[in-house]
Image (cartoon, rainbow, N blue to C red):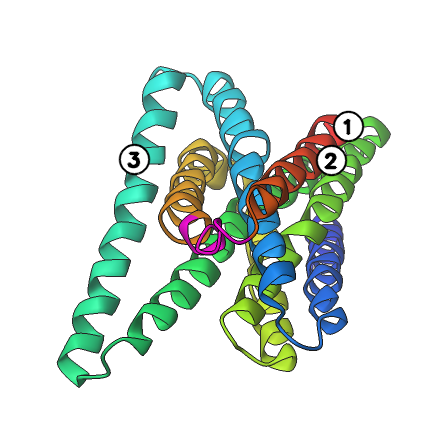
């Protein structure tokens, strides 16, 4: 294995580990109290909305401008819409499949779980590719500045992955899934990053043009899930605890924005 591919693997294993640590926060919630879980579900929504822009759309615009070819605004808009349509089609497919089995109302819970895990997993693929591409640039020869730039990208993405891991496991716990299964599904959403990282490093020249599309696609998917599933769910008991879930959304957005902007 080439050294730069190995570095990409090590770096993305690190980002996956931080996702697992974030998912492990579900261990602190022994019983799914409605008030606390609505707050955490709101927090997850805020994290996903902020990540959609600062972690995905903003870098997508930068990559599209760097690549040339189609205008950046067109690439990012099309990618964003395709991501939203893909998740909408996935939701319809799951609903239709459950209808045929006659499972009835519990299917709504299954839909939310599938869409949540799928959207975060899609979001992690382009992030892994970005880390891999950064280390793949070392294939032309080791340069300390390029290496440190790749390390900083990996560290930034890794730290952002902590609240993202929680953004999967906590809503799953809110849906009544056990703490163990919530953790396993939460950390599993980050396991695609090492695969994507190795792929990005090994095929750096071929993968680069796909990055703006992949990043904006993932953003569209995350926004659809946040607005259609997570936010309505956390607002169900708004009359009992007004603004409680809303403040969770604001807090989640603020934390993710702080990490993204502070870490570049």
- Distance between mark 3 and mark 2 Cα atoms: 26 Å
Residue to which mark 3 is pinned: 81
Residue at 21%, 64% in the rendered image: 93
Residue to which mark 2 is pinned: 259
Decide if residue 128 is in sight here.
Answer: no
Q: Is residue 24 above or below residue 57?
A: below
Q: Quadrant of the C terminus?
A: top right
Q: Say whether disc 3 or disc 2 marks the residue closer to the N-terminus.
A: 3
Classify residue 93 as left or right of residue 21: left
Q: How many marks?
A: 3
Residue at 22%, 76% in the rendered image: 98
Which of 58/29 is in front? 29
Residue 112 appears at what percent x and percent y?
39, 63
Residue to which mark 1 is pinned: 262
Residue 162 appears at what percent x and percent y?
72, 53
Q: Is residue 182 above or below residue 219?
A: below
Residue at 25%, 68% in the rendered image: 94
Predominant SS along the magenta part: loop
Range covered by the magenta-colored residues:
232-240
- Distance between mark 1 and mark 2 Cα atoms: 5 Å
Classify residue 240 as left or right of residue 256: left
Circle 3 crowding by C-alpha within 10 Å: few under 14, some 14–19, many from 20: some
Residue 28: say if magenta.
no
- Distance between mark 3 and mark 1 Cα atoms: 28 Å
């Amino acid at each position: 294995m080439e050294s730069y591919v190995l570095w990409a693997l090590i770096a993305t294993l690190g980002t996956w580990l931080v996702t697992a640590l974030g998912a492990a926060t579900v261990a602190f919630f022994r019983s799914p109290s409605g008030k606390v879980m609505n707050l955490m579900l709101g927090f997850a929504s805020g994290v996903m909305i902020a990540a959609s822009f600062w972690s995905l759309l903003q870098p997508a615009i930068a990559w599209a401008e760097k690549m040339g070819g189609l205008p950046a605004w067109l690439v990012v808009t099309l990618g964003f819409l395709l991501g939203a349509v893909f998740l909408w089609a996935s939701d319809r497919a799951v609903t239709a499949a459950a209808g045929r089995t006659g499972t009835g109302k519990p299917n709504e819970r299954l839909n939310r779980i599938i869409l949540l895990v799928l959207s975060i997993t899609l979001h992690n693929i382009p992030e892994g590719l970005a880390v891999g591409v950064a280390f793949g640039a070392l294939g032309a020869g080791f340069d300390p500045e390029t290496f440190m730039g790749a390390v900083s990208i990996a560290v930034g993405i890794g730290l952002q992955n902590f609240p993202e891991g929680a953004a999967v496991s906590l809503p799953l716990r809110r849906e009544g899934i056990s703490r163990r299964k919530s953790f396993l599904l939460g950390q599993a959403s980050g396991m695609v990053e090492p695969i994507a990282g190795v792929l990005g490093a090994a095929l750096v020249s071929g993968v680069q043009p796909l990055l703006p599309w992949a990043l904006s696609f993932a953003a569209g998917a995350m926004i659809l899930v946040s607005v259609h599933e997570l936010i309505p769910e956390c607002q169900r008991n708004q009359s009992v605890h007004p603004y409680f879930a809303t403040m969770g959304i604001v807090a989640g957005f603020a934390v993710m924005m702080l990490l993204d902007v502070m870490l570049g």
